[in-house]
Amino acid sequence: MGKAKVILLLAVLALVLVAGWQIGSCELANLELQSDLRDLAAEVGTRIGLDARSTDEEFRNAIIHKAEGHDIQLEPAQVTVIRTGAGWDSSVYLAVDYKVRVNLFVYSFNLHFTPSSKK
């Protein structure tokens, strides 16, 4: 009976580690994407005069490119770009709404994320 308990314990531990790894990697990718959204929304290059103002389409393309770097697949419709104000007092709000499928051996589920440029 002792060997069976050890084998069962190791199997359960392996399942927990695999599930934790998959969920943790999705959460980490989401945090990194949220950091990228904040960086893009700050428009630092524009504020110091190095870059021209980005269009909504340029923001969408940049976000999709950043997301691909974190293994997140996005469509342009999943990206929200909202501009407020005018001139130097303008600000940009960026948000993304996406789901990631987590596949465990006998069970799979979706994690829903909504990162944005706001804290």
Image (tube, rainbow, N blue to C red):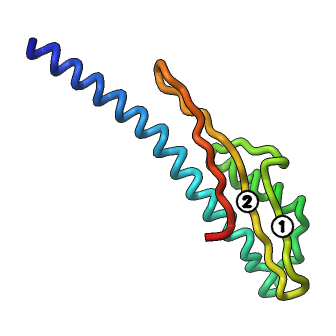
Q: Using residue 16 as the reference point, say whether residue 119 is left or right of it.
A: right
Q: Residue at x 71, y 50 (%)?
A: 97
Q: Earlier in the sequence, mark 1 or mark 2?
A: 1
| 46 vs 30, nearest the viewer | 30
Please state, as top left, top right, bottom left or bottom right, where the N terminus lies in the image: top left
Tags 1 and 2 touching, CB below 8 Å = yes
Label 2 residue SS: strand
From the image, tell me which residue sits under label 2.
Answer: 95
Q: Residue at x 16, y 13 (%)?
A: 4
Q: Which three-letter amino acid code belongs to the residue tagged 1? A: Ile
Q: Residue at x 70, y 55 (%)?
A: 66
Image: 25 above or below 5: below
The 10 Å Cα crowd at callout 1, few under 14, some 14 to 19, many 20 or more, is: few
From the image, tell me which residue sits under label 1.
Answer: 82
Q: x and y percent of residue 63 in the render?
A: 75, 57
Q: Using residue 30 as the reference point, say whether residue 5 is left or right of it.
A: left
Q: Which three-letter amino acid code belongs to the residue tagged 2? A: Ala
| 49 vs 22, nearest the viewer | 22
Q: Residue at x 85, y 88 (%)?
A: 88
Q: Using residue 18 as the reference point, say whether residue 8 is left or right of it.
A: left
Q: x and y percent of residue 96 in the render?
A: 72, 54
| Quadrant in the rendering for residue 109 | top right
| Residue 109 marker | none
The 10 Å Cα crowd at callout 2, few under 14, some 14 to 19, many 20 or more, is: many
